[in-house]
C-alpha cells in the first residue's frame, strides 16, 4: 500500500494594514473607518492607562504591574469585536482589553495596588477576574461557552492567554473540548514572543501556535497582532462563526511585549536591544496613524486632543482610586465562605474585626 | 555548634564572625546554589528542571549560572507546563535519575498534584518496593509580597497528609544546603519548601558537601517554661518572641522542626516533658495543619506532661489577601507567638 496523505494542515495569516500604513484594498472594506478610528482612540487610552500604571508603580503607589506596551492592537481590536453580553476571560496582561470594554479604570488601579475589590466586575460587564495563574482559565471559557449553548443564548466566550500559556495541558484540554462540543468560544493567544525569560522558540517546536487548533479539529489563524484591523476582523469572523453554531476558533495574535515582563523584571538580562528596537519600529500605533492620515482622519491636533482627553480621564480615575477607603480588616475572612464558620466567628471576635 | 545557631540578620552573623574567624558565611539562597552545584558536579544522575530556571536571575539566585556550568541538558528550562514537568521528572527518577524539580512558587504545585500524590508517592508501595521515585520538588513560600490568594500560600499540610511523601522546610543556610543534599539521596519523593524571606539570611555553611538528616528537628534555644515548635521562617519569629519573654521571666525552648514529615515526635515529647507547655508557630493555616498533628502526638504519647492546653499560631482562616492593609492583619509574628506562650503559661 502506498502511503497516502489523509490530512493536510494549512495555516493562514491575516494582515490588513501593513507597517507602512497601506491597507489591502480587498480586505479593508470589512472594517469601517469609524471602527478603526474608535480602535485608535481606545488604543491611546490603553497606552495612557499603561504609562500611568508604570509611573504609579515606580512611585510606590501601586504594586507589581504587567505592561501591555506594544500589544494594544491585539487587545483593543479583539475586545471591541465582542458584544457586551459575551463573556471574557482575560489574563493578567489584559489591561487594554478591560479598558476597551469600559471596565472602570479606577477599579483596575485599585486592583494593581493590591485590592481584591478592584476585580468585582460591575453589573453590565461580563468579565472574569484576570487570571494570574497562567493558562488555567482556558477551560473556564470553554465551560462558560457550554453554559451559553445549553441556555440557548446567542453569546460567545473569549479567552486571552499568552504563548507561554499555550504549552499547558489546560490549553489543550480546553481546545479539545471546544472542538468536540462545537462550543461558541474564541481562543485568543497573545503571542508576544516571550514568557518572562523563555522565548517562543523554547515553548513549542511548531512553526505557529495557530496550527495547534488543527489537532483539535477546528481552525486556527495567525493575525498580525500589531494590525488592529486584522485583529478586529479575525475576532468578528470567529464570533460570527461561533454564534452560528460553527464552533470555536483559535486566533494567534503575533505581537511583541515591548516592556519587561512585569515591573519586577529586567528583560535586558535575556533579550537584545536590537530585537526590541526592531519590534518597536512595528508597534501598532505607528501604522495606524499613517493609515488614518491617508484616509484623512488623522491630524496632529486630533491625536493631541484624543491624548489630552485620555490623560484627563485617567488622572480622574487615579484620583478616584486613591480616594477609595482601604478594605475593612473583617474583609480578610468575610468572603471565604457563603457564611462564617465557627472558627472564623471566633477569630473575628478575638481580633476585634468587623466590630 | 556554629551550625545550630540562628542568626536573625546579617549584622548578627558578622559579629559572630568577628569572634570566630573560622566561620564561613553564606546566604540561604547561595547555600542552595552551592548544594545544587556540588550535586551536579559529582553525580551525573542529578539534573535540575523548572520554568525559567536558566533565567539570569536564577530562581531568586538559587540556580544562578548553573546552566552555564553544566549545560542546558542538565539544567533544563522547561515550557510552561507544571503537571507535565512533574511527570517528566518522575519518569526520569524511575529510570535512574535524581531530578531536582523547581516550582518557583508553592502555588504552582497544585497544578501537578496528580503526578505527586497518585504517582510519585505511590509507586514504591504499588510495585512492592521495586521502584523508587527519588525526586526533590523544590518550592517557595513567602509573605507580604502582595501576591495574594493564588501566589503566596503555605501549602505544606497538603503534603504531610500523604503517605509516601516527605516534607522538608529548612530555616537556616546550613540546613538548606545539608537538607537539599540529603533529600536528593533520600530515595523517596521529597517536597522541599523554602521561604523567600530567608533567601538573604546569612549563616555558617561549610564549603564541603555534607548532609543534614531528614526527620530530625533541632533545639535552637533551651528553656524550661514552654516549648515553641516553629516551622521555617517562624523559627526567627519564635526566637524573637523568646527574647521578649525572657524579659518577663519566661524561658522558652525553641525547636526548629526542619522536617515536617516524618515528624521528629521524640524530640518534641522530650522537650514538652521538661516544659509542660506547647506552642506551635506555623507559616500556614490552622485546621488540620502540622500544629494539629504535633498536638495530637503530644496528647497521645505525653498527655501527662502537659501542664496546660497547647496553643497554635497560624494564619487566619482565609486565603491570603492582596491588600497591604489586610496583609498586616493577616500575618502573625513574634508578638502573637509571645501572647500564645503567655496564655499557655497563665493557664497552668
Ligand atoms: C500556572 C502558573 N505557572 C507559572 C506562573 C509564573 N508565570 C507568570 S507569567 C509567566 C509567563 C507567562 O507567559 P505568557 O503565557 O507568554 O504570557 P505573557 O506574560 O507573555 O503575557 C509565568 C511563567 C504562573 N503565574 N502560573
Ligand atoms: Mg508571552
Image (cartoon, rainbow, N blue to C red):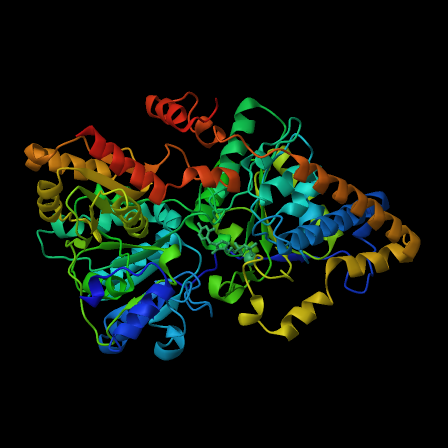
- For the N terminus of chain B, the image quarter is bottom left
**Residue B32 in sight in this render:** no
Task: Locate residue B157 relative to residue B10 in the image: left or right.
Answer: left
Position of the C terminus of chain B, as image quadrant, is top left
Count the marks: 0
Above or below — where is A208 with respect to B223?
below
Q: Residue at x 63, y 73 (%)?
A: A273
Q: Quadrant of ligand 2?
A: bottom right
Nearest to the observer: residue A12 or residue A31: A31
Across and down, in percent, residue B80 comes to 44, 56
Residue A102 x %, y % = 71, 37
> Which residue is more in the foreground, B292 or A271?
B292
- Left or right: B284 with respect to A260? left
Residue B15, quarter of the rendered image: bottom left
**Whole-percent x and y of residue B311?**
24, 34
Instruction: Identify whether A126 is placed above or below B258.
Output: above
Residue B338 appears in the rendering:
yes
Which residue is painted at 38% across and 22% down in the image? A345
What residue sits 83% from the left and 55% below the top? Answer: A25
Residue B249, x across and y down, in percent: 23, 43
Q: Which of these two is toward me, B249 or A180?
A: B249
Residue B259 drawn above or below residue B12: above
Q: Is residue B124 left or right of residue A143?
A: left
Amino acid at each position: 500500500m502506498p502511503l497516502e496523505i489523509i490530512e493536510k494542515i494549512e495555516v493562514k495569516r491575516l494582515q490588513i494594514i501593513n507597517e507602512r500604513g497601506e491597507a489591502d484594498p480587498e480586505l479593508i472594506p470589512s472594517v469601517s473607518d469609524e471602527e478603526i478610528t474608535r480602535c485608535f482612540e481606545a488604543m491611546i487610552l490603553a497606552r495612557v492607562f499603561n504609562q500611568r500604571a508604570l509611573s504609579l508603580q515606580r512611585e510606590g503607589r501601586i504594586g507589581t504591574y504587567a505592561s501591555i506596551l506594544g500589544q494594544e492592537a491585539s487587545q483593543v481590536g479583539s475586545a471591541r469585536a465582542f458584544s457586551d453580553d459575551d463573556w471574557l476571560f482575560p489574563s493578567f496582561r489584559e489591561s487594554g482589553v478591560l479598558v476597551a470594554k469600559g471596565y472602570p479604570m479606577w477599579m483596575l488601579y485599585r486592583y494593581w495596588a493590591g485590592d481584591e475589590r478592584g476585580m468585582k466586575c460591575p453589573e453590565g460587564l461580563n468579565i472574569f477576574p484576570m487570571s494570574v495563574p497562567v493558562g488555567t482559565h482556558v477551560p473556564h471559557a470553554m465551560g462558560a461557552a457550554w453554559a451559553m449553548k445549553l441556555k440557548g443564548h446567542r453569546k460567545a466566550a473569549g479567552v486571552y492567554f499568552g504563548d507561554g500559556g499555550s504549552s499547558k495541558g489546560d490549553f489543550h484540554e480546553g481546545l479539545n473540548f471546544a472542538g468536540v462540543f462545537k462550543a461558541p468560544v474564541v481562543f485568543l493567544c497573545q503571542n508576544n514572543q516571550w514568557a518572562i525569560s523563555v522565548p517562543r522558540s523554547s515553548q513549542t517546536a511548531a512553526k505557529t501556535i495557530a496550527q495547534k487548533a488543527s489537532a483539535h479539529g477546528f481552525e486556527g489563524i495567525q493575525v498580525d497582532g500589531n494590525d488592529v484591523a486584522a485583529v478586529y476582523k479575525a475576532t468578528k469572523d470567529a464570533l460570527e462563526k461561533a454564534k452560528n453554531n460553527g464552533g470555536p476558533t483559535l486566533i494567534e495574535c503575533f505581537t511583541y511585549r515591548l516592556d519587561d515582563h512585569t515591573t519586577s523584571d529586567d528583560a535586558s538580562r535575556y533579550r537584545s536591544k536590537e530585537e526590541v528596537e526592531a519590534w518597536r519600529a512595528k508597534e501598532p500605533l505607528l501604522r495606524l496613524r499613517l493609515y488614518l492620515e491617508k484616509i484623512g482622519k488623522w491630524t496632529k491636533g486630533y491625536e493631541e486632543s484624543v491624548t489630552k482627553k485620555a490623560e484627563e480621564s485617567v488622572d480622574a480615575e487615579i484620583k478616584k482610586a486613591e480616594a477609595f477607603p482601604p478594605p475593612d480588616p473583617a474583609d480578610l475572612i468575610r468572603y471565604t465562605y457563603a457564611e462564617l464558620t465557627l472558627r472564623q466567628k471566633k477569630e473575628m471576635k478575638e481580633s476585634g474585626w468587623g466590630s | 555548634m556554629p551550625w545550630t545557631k540562628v542568626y536573625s540578620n546579617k549584622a548578627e552573623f558578622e559579629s559572630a564572625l568577628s569572634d570566630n574567624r573560622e566561620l564561613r558565611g553564606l546566604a540561604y539562597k547561595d547555600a542552595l546554589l552551592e548544594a545544587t552545584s556540588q550535586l551536579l558536579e559529582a553525580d551525573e544522575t542529578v539534573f535540575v528542571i523548572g520554568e525559567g530556571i536558566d533565567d539570569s536571575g536564577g530562581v531568586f539566585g538559587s540556580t544562578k549560572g548553573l546552566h552555564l556550568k553544566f549545560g542546558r541538558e542538565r539544567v533544563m528550562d522547561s515550557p510552561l507546563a507544571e503537571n507535565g514537568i512533574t511527570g517528566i521528572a518522575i519518569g526520569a527518577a524511575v529510570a535512574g535519575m535524581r531530578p531536582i524539580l523547581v516550582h518557583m512558587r508553592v502555588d504552582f504545585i497544585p497544578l501537578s498534584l496528580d503526578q505527586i500524590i497518585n504517582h510519585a508517592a505511590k509507586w514504591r508501595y504499588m510495585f512492592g518496593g521495586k521502584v523508587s521515585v527519588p525526586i526533590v520538588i523544590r518550592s517557595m513560600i513567602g509573605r507580604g509580597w502582595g501576591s495574594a490568594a493564588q501566589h503566596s500560600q503555605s501549602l505544606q499540610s497538603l503534603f504531610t497528609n500523604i503517605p509516601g511523601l516527605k516534607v522538608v522546610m529548612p530555616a537556616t543556610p546550613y540546613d538548606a544546603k545539608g537538607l537539599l543534599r540529603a533529600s536528593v539521596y533520600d530515595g523517596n519523593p521529597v517536597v522541599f519548601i523554602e521561604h523567600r524571606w530567608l533567601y538573604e539570611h546569612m549563616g555558617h555553611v561549610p564549603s564541603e558537601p555534607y548532609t543534614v538528616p531528614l526527620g530530625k528537628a533541632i533545639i535552637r534555644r533551651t528553656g524550661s517554661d514552654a516549648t515553641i515548635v516553629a516551622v521555617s521562617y517562624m523559627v526567627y519569629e519564635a526566637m524573637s518572641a523568646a527574647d521578649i519573654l525572657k524579659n518577663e521571666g519566661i524561658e522558652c525552648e525553641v525547636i526548629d522542626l526542619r522536617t515536617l514529615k516524618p515528624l521528629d515526635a521524640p524530640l518534641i515529647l522530650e522537650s514538652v516533658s521538661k516544659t509542660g507547655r506547647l506552642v506551635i508557630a506555623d507559616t500556614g493555616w490552622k485546621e488540620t495543619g502540622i500544629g494539629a498533628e504535633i498536638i495530637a502526638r503530644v496528647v497521645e504519647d505525653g498527655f501527662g506532661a502537659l501542664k496546660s492546653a497547647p496553643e497554635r499560631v497560624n494564619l487566619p482562616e482565609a486565603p491570603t489577601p492582596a491588600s497591604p492593609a489586610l496583609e498586616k492583619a493577616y500575618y502573625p509574628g513574634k508578638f502573637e507567638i509571645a501572647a500564645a506562650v503567655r496564655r499557655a503559661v497563665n493557664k497552668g
